[in-house]
Amino acid sequence: MNIKLLGFFVLISIGIIGGCESADNQPAMAVPTPQMPDGWQVVEDFQVPPVQLSQIAAKMNADLLGIRNTSFEVEGLRIKVNTLITGTQADAEKVMIYMKGNKSEQALLQRGMIIYEFVGSNEINHLIPVGRRFLEES
């Protein structure tokens, strides 16, 4: 009886210890590529790896579940749309406050716990309202 009980505790301990991974080793949430208007052609698309995600989250002092960087070609110009997904509404607000310190409000869009950031040269400024409107309506 004691051997069975000892075996049971060993199995439980292995399960508990094995289930304790650091946040850096856990995969980030799969962030979908944003669907944009016709004519916006994806030319680069990648999800930020967990280690970099942790660094960005620490800098913003917010819980980030995932970030995707997607570059589009539109009218011969390149515009990047970064999609950030936060853990809570409060985290989304922290991210917006942080980003407003570095970007114009026009280049940012918050929809619940998702934040979109438009990045590019001044030549793409006329495309930002088009992209924002499309994301707001979808």
Image (cartoon, helix red, strand yellow):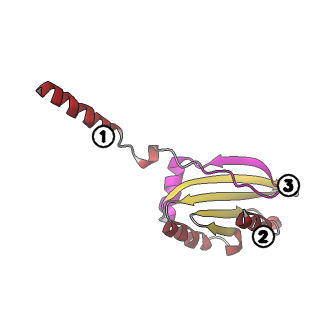
Percent of width and height locating residue 33 = 68, 51
Q: Residue at x 58, y 66 (%)?
A: 112
Q: Which residues are magenta?
A: 31-60
Which is more N-terminal, label 1 or label 2?
A: 1
Disc 3 secondary structure class: loop
Q: Residue at x 62, y 70 (%)?
A: 102
Residue extending farthest left:
2
Q: Which mark is residue 27?
A: none
Residue extending farthest right:
75
Figure quadrant of the C terminus: bottom right
Can you say whether 47 is above or below 118 in the image? above
- Label 3 sits on what residue type? Gly
**Tag 1 and tag 3, C-beta contact below 8 Å:** no
Q: CA distance from mark 2 to mark 1?
A: 50 Å
The residue identified by callout 3 is: 39
Figure quadrant of the N terminus: top left
Can you say whether 134 is above or below 10 in the image? below
Q: Which mark is residue 129?
A: 2
Q: Is residue 2 magenta?
A: no
> Looking at the image, which is closer to me, 16 or 105?
16
- Label 2 sits on what residue type? Pro
Q: Residue at x 60, y 62 (%)?
A: 114
The residue identified by callout 1 is: 16
Q: CA distance from mark 1 to mark 3?
A: 51 Å
Residue extending farthest front:
1
Percent of width and height locating residue 78 = 80, 56
